[in-house]
Amino acid sequence: METTVLKKRAILYVTILYGFLILGWLATMILPDAYTVVWGLFSVLPVVATILTRIITQDKSPWYLKPNFCKSWKTYLFAAFLPGATIFLGGVLYFTLYPQDLDLSARNLVAQYGQYGAPETIQFTTQTVIRIGLAFIFLSPLVLPVHLFALGEEIGWRGYLLPILLKLTSPRKAVLLHGDLWGLAHTPLIYFGFNYGSSYWGAP
């Protein structure tokens, strides 16, 4: 009985969330000017899907919102700094293999952030880029607005759906399925160039 209820909750959560995302996708295609508003809500939708799923299925289970820094401090440090370090090392590897792509004039940065007051002429050196990358590793965990913006996804995907999947199958299968579903949810953002731009071959 419990397995049936858990499956129902998992399927309902994904159905509701994907439904919202498809509606947002269609709305943006019909009204391109609505892009900022529609996809500004992207991180809120998993919470809405969670609330609706809990109401519809009468789910009274506890919310996974209580951090435990003392018991899990190693996990928190791992999560805080490893992604930044991985991104930095990935950048180093890429520009080592393709040095011609390293643009020290930061044309893309100026084009993207110039409207917000970024200087129109920036000239970096390889050393300053490395210093900025290292600073990014240590400072990114402290950028609270980014964490707050992403909190909705954490509450919905990792805080609600993942624990359900872990009860239905093995940890390996649960994490892989969860990652596939979460990644697929980003399809509309990828389509509109949010994650990877739209200038590469085959985009989107």
Image: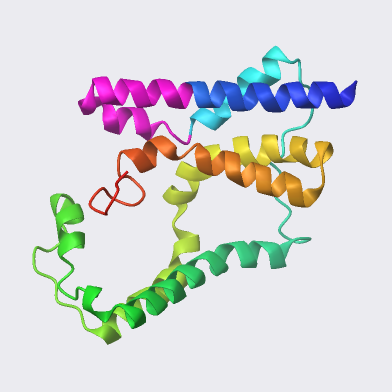
Q: x, y (%) of residue 123?
A: 14, 76
Q: Residue at x 74, y 21 (%)?
A: 8
Q: x, y (%) of residue 99?
A: 27, 80
Identify which residue, 195 or 109, lies in the foreground: 195
**In the rendered structure, which segment of residues is drawn in magenta?**
20-43
**Number of numbered markers:** 0
Residue extending furthest toward the right: 1
Location of the N terminus (image quadrant): top right
Q: Residue at x 48, y 67 (%)?
A: 84
Q: x, y (%) of residue 60?
A: 78, 22
Left or right relative to 186: residue 11: right
Relative to 134, does residue 164 appear above or below in the rendering? above
Give the quadrant of residue 103: bottom left
Q: x, y (%) of residue 73?
A: 71, 64
Residue extending furthest toward the bottom: 127
Identify which residue, 108 or 152, lies in the foreground: 108
Left or right relative to 193: residue 114: left
Q: Residue at x 33, y 75 (%)?
A: 132
Relative to 90, does residue 120 appear above or below in the rendering? above
Residue extending furthest toward the front: 202
Location of the C terminus (image quadrant): top left
Residue extending furthest toward the left: 121
Is 26 in the magenta? yes
Left or right relative to 201: residue 107: left
Q: Residue at x 28, y 33 (%)?
A: 36
Identify which residue, 166 or 142, lies in the foreground: 166
Left or right relative to 149: residue 104: left
Relative to 83, does residue 164 appear above or below in the rendering? above
In terms of secondary structure, what is the magenta stretch mainly? helix
Is 3 in the magenta? no
